[in-house]
Amino acid sequence: MSNITVDELAAMLHNLPDPMPVSFRLYYTDNGAPICYTMEALAGNYIEVDAKTYAIAPFNVKVVNNQLIVIKPKITVKKLQPGANGIACDVRDVCIVVDNDRPHIKWSITTNETT
């Protein structure tokens, strides 16, 4: 084992290459759909994103003209609705299921989307 002098150590540290710059990347398909967030240099389409976006890594986004566009999620609301089809329930209480030969109101679940 050889002894290294302070001057030799300083010379080695001085000759180290500069570190690679940090680059946060979002790789995406040709349609703009996200594939992955990474700091690696991979093959394919990518845009650079900021550290906050990289940390969150949202997938409700799309890349359009090298810009990151956030896609608002649709909100679905399910609701009981009376109608001609559905489950026969007592006319006074939707929680009580009855036979079709008794007085009833038919209820079904409808799904509505809002933006």
Image (tube, grey):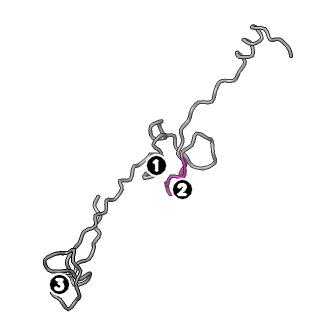
Q: Nearer the viewer, mark 3 or mark 1?
A: 3
Q: Secondary structure at mark 1?
A: loop
Please name the residue shown 28% across and 67% down the image: 78
Q: Total of numbered circles in the picture? A: 3
Q: Nearer the viewer, residue 68 or 2?
A: 2
Q: Quadrant of the N terminus?
A: top right
Res 104 label: 3
Q: Secondary structure at mark 3?
A: strand
Please name the residue shown 17% across and 84% down the image: 104
Of the numbered discs 2 and 1, the one sitting upstream in the chain is 2
Q: Which quadrant of the figure has residue 13?
A: top right
Part of the protein shown in magenta: 27-36
Q: Residues within 10 Å of mark 3 (few under 14, many from 20)?
A: some
How far apart are labels 3 and 1 at the CA level? 57 Å
Q: Residues within 10 Å of mark 2 (few under 14, many from 20)?
A: few
93 versus 67 height, above or below: below
Residue flagged by tag 1: what amino acid is it? Asn
Q: Nearer the viewer, mark 2 or mark 1?
A: 2
Residue flagged by tag 2: what amino acid is it? Asp
How far apart are labels 2 and 1 at the CA level? 11 Å
Please name the residue shown 57% across and 43% down the image: 38
Residue occupied by mark 2: 30
Query: Does the magenta segment cover residue 29?
Result: yes
Residue occupied by mark 1: 65
39 versus 74 height, above or below: above
